Image (cartoon, coloured by chain):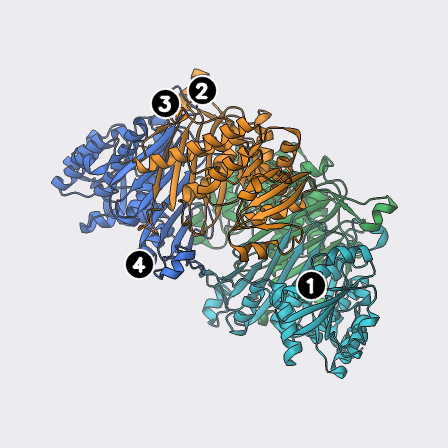
Chain colours: A orange, B blue, C cyan, D green
Amino acid sequence: MIRVAVLGAGYWGPNLIRNFSACPDTQLVAVCDKMADRLKKVLAPYPGVEALDAPEALWSRGDVDAVAIATPVATHAPLALAALRAGKHVLVEKPMAAGVAEAHAMVAAARDAKRVLMVDHTFLYSPPVRKMKQLLDAGELGDLYYVDSVRINLGLFQHDVNVVWDLAPHDLSIMDYLVGRLPKSVSAFGACHADSRNQIEDVAYLNLDFGDGLTAAFHVNWLSPVKVRHFIVGGSRKSIVYNDLEPAEKIRVYDRGITVSQDPEARRGMLVGYRTGDVWLPHLEGGEPLQTMVRHFAECVGQGKTPLSDGEAGLRVVRILEAAQRSIKNQGARIPLDDAAKE
Amino acid sequence: MIRVAVLGAGYWGPNLIRNFSACPDTQLVAVCDKMADRLKKVLAPYPGVEALDAPEALWSRGDVDAVAIATPVATHAPLALAALRAGKHVLVEKPMAAGVAEAHAMVAAARDAKRVLMVDHTFLYSPPVRKMKQLLDAGELGDLYYVDSVRINLGLFQHDVNVVWDLAPHDLSIMDYLVGRLPKSVSAFGACHADSRNQIEDVAYLNLDFGDGLTAAFHVNWLSPVKVRHFIVGGSRKSIVYNDLEPAEKIRVYDRGITVSQDPEARRGMLVGYRTGDVWLPHLEGGEPLQTMVRHFAECVGQGKTPLSDGEAGLRVVRILEAAQRSIKNQGARIPLDDAAKE
Amino acid sequence: MIRVAVLGAGYWGPNLIRNFSACPDTQLVAVCDKMADRLKKVLAPYPGVEALDAPEALWSRGDVDAVAIATPVATHAPLALAALRAGKHVLVEKPMAAGVAEAHAMVAAARDAKRVLMVDHTFLYSPPVRKMKQLLDAGELGDLYYVDSVRINLGLFQHDVNVVWDLAPHDLSIMDYLVGRLPKSVSAFGACHADSRNQIEDVAYLNLDFGDGLTAAFHVNWLSPVKVRHFIVGGSRKSIVYNDLEPAEKIRVYDRGITVSQDPEARRGMLVGYRTGDVWLPHLEGGEPLQTMVRHFAECVGQGKTPLSDGEAGLRVVRILEAAQRSIKNQGARIPLDDAAKE
Amino acid sequence: MIRVAVLGAGYWGPNLIRNFSACPDTQLVAVCDKMADRLKKVLAPYPGVEALDAPEALWSRGDVDAVAIATPVATHAPLALAALRAGKHVLVEKPMAAGVAEAHAMVAAARDAKRVLMVDHTFLYSPPVRKMKQLLDAGELGDLYYVDSVRINLGLFQHDVNVVWDLAPHDLSIMDYLVGRLPKSVSAFGACHADSRNQIEDVAYLNLDFGDGLTAAFHVNWLSPVKVRHFIVGGSRKSIVYNDLEPAEKIRVYDRGITVSQDPEARRGMLVGYRTGDVWLPHLEGGEPLQTMVRHFAECVGQGKTPLSDGEAGLRVVRILEAAQRSIKNQGARIPLDDAAKE
């Protein structure tokens, strides 16, 4: 039984509180938030859970094995570093940190402390993303050609982060999980329309080049009149379209590949031949992704395993975000990630 | 009655032949193509139309008022220049020319010859695009924020042009018509997946900046397993989603704007307020866009009017295409269009 | 503050418990269920609520103003009659009773006791049904021609009731609310496929004739591989399509009427002219239907109002159900509802 | 080479003319229609085809092997009987005849004359219906439970026939092809809304009982604001949903069956267990159904084969239509088809 304290009872914290309470492998010991009224309300259905107004007292407590950090992004690194140095395991919301340097420090601290550092890339624990990963790992798609992701909606503006840091971590973490490696370079284009005074981008496009024939594009948008979640993984043999808004058909596998014909005669009329085949909508298992994530955290802590969404994965996402941000501010210049790695 | 010769009986030529034949204001006099067999087959249902194997004889004929050019892109400019200098009016397929310099020369030649030069931007003559233009001109959308266009499909590879020159002219011409001005700069990202030997891009993303708060993005793709035609025009008051694949609901007008609240108290909790309102699917008139286009050409020739899709419009599209191509080959560097204008 | 006891903690009871607890105008006093374990689990988050194993003790208690009955259908009438005779207001799940005679007795008992008898026709309190009612009452549709409802899905089989009594009450109650009167006759067709031994119909079709040009049809199905909720209200001027599965576009208003031309010449070529117009997707207010229903019950009890879904409405739905059942067992014979009324 | 004359150049005739002209196995010799102007216009692109104003002259001509009848329904039987008695093969539009007696006579005449009598049930020659037939014949669906068909649209009213005779032949012929046998009884409900004076039904519902656990329902409607073509075939192992309006996904195969559990313990909680599985969208071959139909006719004539949609199939559809009509006029009474067979 892993004893957990949750830091932050704002937007996402209650979801963690609910899931740690419901998980048979964890015990929710305490929740910490400066806003006493908010905290009291959130903890009403959990009479046995302690309310704290500051996290410092937790570090020395022997009855807390792990903390889950759901505070504003800027505080992720200091809280995680303090917790890890105190010997606590850490689950941290995404994005893992506000910058690459901080994320590096968190990874190093976890390594030094021999503690689990896991990032809540929730989508990795959802049935459609799991199914995509299975199909890719089984080689069903052939060579990977491109990823194209659209995540647009009419949503709440954020004070502190732009649309890239707000929405792109979802899709970048999915892509990172599927592809399993860092792109070579990132270019990005962003614009501030609705709130031009504060220069917070509300529409942005990211283009990633992996240098080996794979490219990935991401469109994130706060201003759309319609909600769209469309994620294509295009391969030489098959392609997958993942639409998270479809209630019953989130994953479609298209048995339509592209065959570049080698026969010179055939190449005269057409450079590339097409096949058009069946479409398959695999059945997806049920399961609440957040509950699966919480159980995976408990299992990693309990058995010393490395999480699917470990600190390294979180760091890769932050490296892409930071490079994208730099590209936006530099007229879309291509930012190499190899250099970034040396920071 | 405008007497017309069509140059080229390949992929698109037969559509022009059919429409010039059906138009009450035009008379199809001759069709020219080097491939005699192809030409004979195409002209079978049109016994009164002359078959020619080369266009030169047309220039001096007094019974031909205009030519319609549906040949490969590289030949557009020489044919159009010869025709204009011979005093013929010209309708030319899109893209108007293979480069900006050629397109400039075509516009100049038409001006000098006092003849109509029109580009077949067919979508401008379609009911949904007409309806969008009406709504924009009536101020229904408020300030324009962004255009986002996705045109992806599993289609035939081209020998001579990449996906940008093949697919983007459609959407760029629609955007140009709606917005009525040239962007300040273009950046683009493209990749060659299926046919890497020939370095013909099969997936590309274009980002246009108008310098006044308006941005436009275009995704064109030859490799998708699904066909998508999605065109969003986002405004401060309303937004339009145009889906050309919807049989009965191509245009949706969303009465959902974004209101930046000026009240400091209100701004504390949320920087930007949202309204969510009705959606309206306006009835669209019928009408074959190509027939409307052909009649518009006849009307412009007959009455000395300037076409909606005149040489200037065609030139603006070619300037964007050429800048996008240069950006793709320069790591996505932002290409200013003011400089390009001085070429 | 209305003090309420809920009878039944099975499938639907917990929804009532949650909503009576959350409603500012009601106080949940007690919940009654024979299954002690189930009841204990359901009441865990509600420490102040009393658990009872039988309802009889409630009748004489002065601290209970109303009961909400969520027990099996066969027990609705005896419980409601006992409660009403004891001076309690009653909210009862749908269908109100297992037969017309029982429903009549419940209505009479409420009248005699001068107490509120309300049926939980939840859909009447949902935003899309409210919007349809507004449009009909405003005369937007012209003359009503037909209602066509399809409610099919892969769902749980019931022991005690067939698909008609299980699914049709939803749509019949919506239709009854919109139309506000009883049909003249009912015919129905039903079949038992999956569980032929028990002769419980799993697919059924109901046809209602109002005798004045309005007809209504209902397809209910437990065996479908796809879930469908499609409800059309066709009028002479406009028509509404209500699709409850659409997340953001549940109601579509079609501005397409049918105009029977009176001109004899025009009638020669075509008996009926068509207009095709705009489609309008009105914005719907939010609001949890069950919470709206519970508040309406509290308001009716507190202010002596007649509920939208009063006993008479519940009785009309039961009369149609019973007639449909009789028709199914009589080879689809048309069952007049005037006769049924005399029972 | 089968030499064919087409009777009737109205609504459907030109489609037959075009397809017999394009078919390599048939030669279109003559077309017959009383309306000389209409006929002249229709035959303009076919200079070698003879125009006739009456069919009688055809019967004795040796250069005509077969006639295709696309005249009003009331004339199908007399024309077909005359042609068969003159030794011509006959293709007749659907519905085959205006009544069962006439259809019987046509079948008998074809038998006596040893000539092919085929009904143009075009959908049987379409790729999605072919695919459904393949799957059924391969036993993929298990036991057939039900067919449910919805064909509704805003269409042209007919003078001479109601919505049942106009629209239902399509779906009845598909069902007949799939199921391969006649139902035991038919009940139907129809109503006249828009044109009540002439008592032509514009909305109707048919229910067919095969007496062996299979039932089939058909909803046909001229008044709908939306076009729907939805055809479900439900089986014990799999189910098919056929949506003819889907451009690329007309057929969906649902791997979701219903398993009636035999274990008494399991039956306590739930009478019937559900499986939920994959969905499969099989690739469909291309091919114009009407061209396939015309070639099949030519093949049957040339090789003495029995057509898929022979006179017996046409007769079965007419028997259902006539029984449905009688049921509508008799308050929905169930009409046995065994009795009808004895007429």
Q: Nearer the viewer, residue C275 or A142?
A: A142
Q: Spot the residue most to the left.
A: B112
Q: Can you say whether C108 is above or below D167 in the image?
A: below
Q: Chain of mark 2?
A: A
Q: Nearer the viewer, mark 3 or mark 2?
A: 3
Label 1, residues with CA under 10 Å away: few <14, some 14-19, many ≥20? many
Residue at 37% x, 37% y is A325
What amino acid is labelled 3 in the image?
A: Gln
- Say whether mark 2 and mark 4 are on the same chain: no
Label 2, residues with CA under 10 Å away: few <14, some 14-19, many ≥20? few
Residue B139: mark in rendering: 4
Q: Nearer the viewer, residue B137 or D2?
A: B137
Q: Is residue D123 visible?
A: yes
x and y percentages locating residue A108 in the rendered image: 49, 28
The answer to whether residue B159 is left or right of residue C322 is left
Q: CA distance from mark 3 to mark 1?
A: 65 Å
Residue under label 2: A266
Q: Is residue B47 visible?
A: no
Q: CA distance from mark 1 to mark 4?
A: 49 Å
Residue under label 3: B199
Q: Secondary structure at mark 2?
A: helix
Quarter of the view holding residue C205? bottom right
What amino acid is labelled 2 in the image?
A: Ala
- Say whether mark 4 and mark 3 are on the same chain: yes
Q: Nearer the viewer, mark 3 or mark 1?
A: 1
Residue under label 1: C16
Q: CA distance from mark 3 to mark 4?
A: 43 Å
